[in-house]
Image: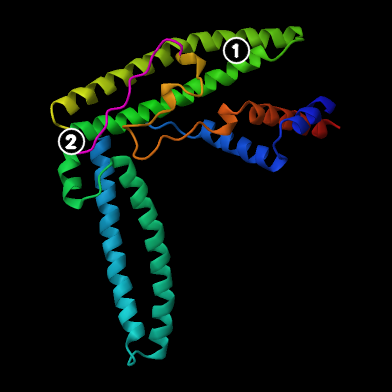
Amino acid sequence: RKAAESILRDCGKSETDLRAEWKDQVKTQTKPLPCQSRNAGKDAVKELLQMRETRDGLKKQEREYDALIEDEATPMDEYIEAKADLESVRVCLQDLNTRIRNKQSVLGATDHARLRNLMNNPFLTARMNTLALKQRLCNRLCARKFEMERLERSFRKQVNDQKVDAHTASSVRSREPAITKVARSYNTLCATMEKLFADGKAPPGAICPKQLELKGIFDLDVDDTIWEDIGLEDGLPAAPPPWLANESVRAGIKALLERDRCIEEE
């Protein structure tokens, strides 16, 4: 316990921050992985069109409630009901607008007519599938990295620990070919997007993502191409989360969990 508390003091992070990072790590590593789909682009566009139609309906309701409230001839009971309904509609509109913006940023399209043209766009389908495949690859690489760390950070081991570690090492090695296969599939999709781009089948302003360098892919360094989502999502690529990229945060989380276990056993 003293050793864990010493690491907690030296890591430079508060217990609140470490628990928040641990919660985010658990959420990220346990969420279901996105699947590929031949109709991924078409389904995403359909969902966005439906959301925009729903928004149009809510805006119409908002105008109707506004008219009732501004009409001096509106009875008091209808006025009160319209005020309450208007507030509810505006909350729904705000939430729906946020979801629409998020969906549009993934598609890279904002014009309604262009969305309909993208329904059967092969570049869009490849883009959505490539993003799903990359997220799956990142999750598998992160899981492998944490398994390997368990093997590397222990010094004194008893017989049972050695057996568990031997089993872990064997499991890690057995999964490496599958991870490499996912990486190759990702590069194949990137090549497909490059060809579609060259053939003029990509939407205006589209960018092709970089292919991954398979050599050293298991190192999972902070500046690796695996973290760059340029061409897959609009905007700047997100930095790796602190629970994965920041050594002080990672050491602090381990020490925090060890101290919690010590307290439970006291």
Magenta stretch: includes residue 214:
yes
Toward the viewer: 167 or 70?
70
Residue 220 x, y percent position in the rendering: 50, 19
Toward the viewer: 9 or 43?
9
Q: Which residue is mark 1?
A: 168
**Residue 121 bears which disc, if any?**
2
Which residue type carries mark 1? Thr
Residue 180 x, y percent position in the rendering: 40, 13
> Residue at 65% across / 31% down in the picture?
249
Instruction: Report which quarter residue 40 is drawn in.
Output: top left
The image quadrant where one finds the C terminus is top right
**Between discs 2 and 1, the one toward the N terminus:** 2
> Residue at 41% across / 22% down in the picture?
225
Magenta segment range?
Answer: 203-216
Toward the viewer: 139 or 251?
251
Q: Is residue 123 visible?
A: yes
Q: Is residue 55 left or right of residue 112?
A: right
Q: Nearer the viewer, mark 2 or mark 1?
A: 2
Which scheme is used to colour this image of the protein? Answer: rainbow
Residue 242 x, y percent position in the rendering: 58, 33
The image quadrant where one finds the N terminus is top right
Which residue, as the protein is rendered here, is positioned at the far right?
Answer: 266
Q: CA distance from mark 2 to mark 1?
A: 43 Å
Q: Is residue 36 visible?
A: no
Q: Are marks 2 and 1 in contact (CB under 8 Å)?
A: no
Instruction: Report which quarter residue 202 is drawn in.
Output: top left
Q: Is residue 202 above or below residue 173?
A: below
Which residue type carries mark 2? Asn
Q: Main secondary structure of the magenta part?
A: loop
> Residue at 38% across / 68% down in the picture?
89
**SS for dot 1:** helix
